[in-house]
Structures are given as structure tokens and as C-alpha cells.
Amino acid sequence: MAMNYLAIVTAAVAAWIVGGVYYSVLSKQWLAAQGMTVEEAKAKHEAVKGTARAWLPFVLVFVAELIIAWILAGLLGHLGMFTVRGGVISAAIVWFGFVLTTIVGNYAFHQRSYALMLIDAGGWLLAFLVIGAIVGGWTP
């Protein structure tokens, strides 16, 4: 099966950027859902500034989004659904069946707030939909 690696990389970059915008817009709600103030967040940021702990999460999320795009492209190839619609529907189903269920379980046992769970699950849903649309719409 042929893979469109340009579509995979483009989808990962787009999802990473959209995620950055999403969390920027919801930054106050995200902090509140964690029980953290802006001042505490700034102090945490200053403590790791200039170290790998400051930038490594961004790299790991990008790598995760590359893997998601690659796997979703493979899934769409097996299903023969290389359309924007097919990509978005498949991405939503995969997110619902694997991502949301995992987040709910983890957040419940970690006793994280429902607000944080909704924000983070929504961020991943958005990433999956962006990736699905790009990979699905960009036929190999």
C-alpha cells in the first residue's frame, strides 16, 4: 500500500498548530481545571526554562501526531476511504473508541477534574479530525 508521507507530515504539523491555538484559547480554563493559577504556571515555566523539560512535551506531542497520521493513513488505505469525509469519520470513530475511553479511564483513576478531561479529550478530538481530513483528502 502506498503512503502519502507529505500528507502525513502536513497533517501532523496542522494538528500540532491547531492544538497550540486550542490550548491558547482555553489556557485559563485548562489551568483552572488543574487547580493551578497563572502565577503558579509561570513559576513552573520559569523553573524549567532552558531545559529539555520545557520543550520535550511539544516534541512528544508532535511525534504522537505523526504516528496518529501514519496509522490513520494505513487504516484509510485498508478501508479504501481516501476522502475528506472518510478520513473525518474514521478519525472520529478511532478517537471515540480508543482515545476517549483511555482518557476517561485514566482521568477517573487519577481523580482529575471532568473539566480537564473534557478539555484534553476535545483537544485530541480536534487533532484527530484535522489529521483525518488532511490524510483522507490527500489521496496517495
Image: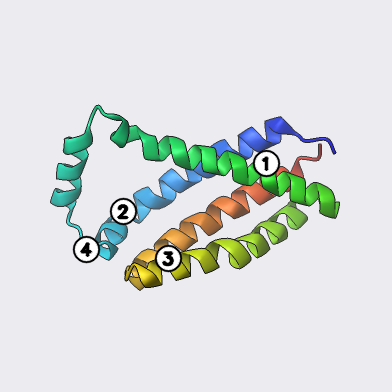
Of tags 3 and 4, which is closer to the observer?
Answer: 3
User: Callout 3: helix, strand or loop?
Assistant: helix
Of tags 1 and 2, which is closer to the observer?
Answer: 1
User: Callout 4: helix, strand or loop?
Assistant: loop
Q: Position of residue 120 (x, y in %)?
A: 42, 59
In the foreground, 109 or 20: 109
In this rendering, is residue 95 above or below 135?
Answer: below
Q: Which residue is mark 4?
A: 35
Q: Are marks 2 and 3 in contact (CB under 8 Å)?
A: no
Image quarter where the N terminus lies is: top right
Q: Label 2 amino acid? A: Ser
Q: Residue at x 32, y 68 (%)?
A: 112
Whole-Å distance between the Cαs marked 2 and 3? 21 Å
Q: Residue 27 got which mark?
A: 2
Q: Label 1 amino acid? A: Trp
N-term-proximal mark, 1 vs 2: 2
N-term-proximal mark, 2 vs 4: 2
Residue 83 appears anywhere in the view: no
Q: Residue 106 got which mark?
A: 3
User: Callout 1: helix, strand or loop?
Assistant: helix
Q: Residue at x 41, y 38 (%)?
A: 58
Whole-Å distance between the Cαs marked 4 and 1? 35 Å
Q: Residue 70 got which mark?
A: 1
